[in-house]
Image (cartoon, grey):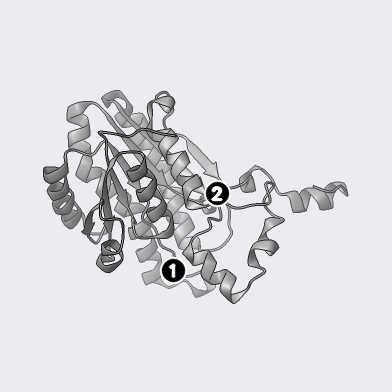
């Protein structure tokens, strides 16, 4: 479907559900994939073709050191995918100050750190793509408030990157997934088998994305087909943010 032969792609949060899908897809499309995650054991269990490194993305100095080492061995980064993310408290009532700091650090500051680590080489080549992985939570109050606030900040940061670095040949866009069929959701389904059926009524397509759907969106925004697209937020959410079919049905007394 896509050809990224000769491209170096840096993916963070590589050992998570979406991260693994991104890594596998870009490997299959011919890229050299640099995979970062804080979980060294999980990285070690992944495809042997990956160039892996364990690092705390909230530590700017550590990120720069690790990225410099990977670049020295594999070449400069053409495409940065800031996928790392995590959520602590599910509601304001249980949110602690340390949860707030954690979620901002891993969901927003980590992306900034990775951009800082690769931008000089992109500037020098006047070429580069930055894809940030956000969430539909950035525009909706549907739980995990600190995570959602951080991802909303990531939207603003993406637009700033697009505007300020566009004249230097760099494009920046954000992919905003809704519910994605990852291991985390499989674990929820194990606890409550009907969880997906209960949720489907909120999604116009009556289905959910899987990691490959996210990878396809990232690939499109990373390739020359989208060379005039920058600063956008692309939802991959089965229509969740387009409208509310449950509310629409109740308002109109029609079936949706």
> Dot 2, how many residues are within 10 Å of its Cα: few (below 14), some (14-19), or many (20+)?
some
Any part of residue 201 in sight: yes
Please tell me how many numbered marks the rendered image carries: 2
Q: Mark yes or no: residue 91 visible.
A: no
User: Badge 1 local density, few (<14 within 10 Å), some, or many (20+)?
Assistant: some
98 on left or right of 192: left
Quadrant housing residue 56: bottom left
Marking on residue 139: 2
**Marks 2 and 1 in Cβ contact (< 8 Å):** no
On the image, numbered disc 1 is attached to which residue?
Answer: 88
Q: Tell me if residue 23 comes above or below residue 6 in the rendering.
A: below
Q: Nearer the viewer, residue 161 or 133?
A: 133
The residue under the point 40% across, 69% down is: 99
The quarter of the picture where residue 125 lies is: top left
User: Which structural element holds mark 1?
Assistant: loop
Q: Residue at x 22, y 33 (%)?
A: 122
Q: Position of residue 16 (x, y in %)?
A: 39, 60
The single residue placed furthest to the right in the displayed view is 253
Looking at marks 2 and 1 on the same chain, the residue that comes earlier in the sequence is marked by: 1
**Residue drawn at (54%, 43%) of the image:** 235
């Amino acid at each position: 479907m896509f050809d990224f032969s000769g491209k170096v792609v840096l993916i963070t949060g590589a050992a998570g559900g979406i991260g693994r899908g991104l890594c596998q897809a870009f490997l299959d499309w011919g890229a050299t994939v640099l995979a970062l995650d804080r979980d060294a054991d999980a990285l070690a269990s992944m495809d042997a073709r990956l160039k892996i490194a364990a690092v705390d993305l909230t530590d700017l100095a550590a990120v720069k050191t690790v990225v410099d080492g990977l670049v020295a061995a594999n070449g400069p980064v053409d495409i940065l995918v800031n996928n790392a993310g995590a959520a602590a408290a599910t509601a304001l009532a249980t949110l602690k100050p340390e949860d707030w700091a954690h979620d901002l650090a891993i969901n927003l500051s980590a992306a900034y750190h990775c951009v800082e680590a690769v931008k000089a080489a992109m500037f020098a080549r006047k070429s580069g793509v930055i894809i940030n992985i956000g969430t539909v939570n950035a525009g909706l109050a549907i739980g995990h408030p600190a995570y959602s606030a951080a991802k909303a900040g990531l939207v603003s940061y993406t637009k700033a990157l697009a505007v300020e670095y566009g004249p230097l040949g760099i494009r920046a866009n954000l992919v905003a997934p809704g519910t994605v069929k990852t291991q985390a959701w499989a674990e929820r389904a194990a606890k409550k088998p009907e969880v997906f059926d209960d949720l489907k009524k909120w999604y116009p397509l009556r289905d959910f994305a899987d990691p490959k759907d996210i990878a396809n969106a990232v690939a499109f925004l990373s390739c020359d087909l989208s060379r005039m697209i920058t600063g956008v937020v692309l939802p991959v959410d089965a229509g969740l943010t387009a409208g509310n079919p449950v509310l629409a049905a109740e308002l109109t007394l029609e079936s949706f």
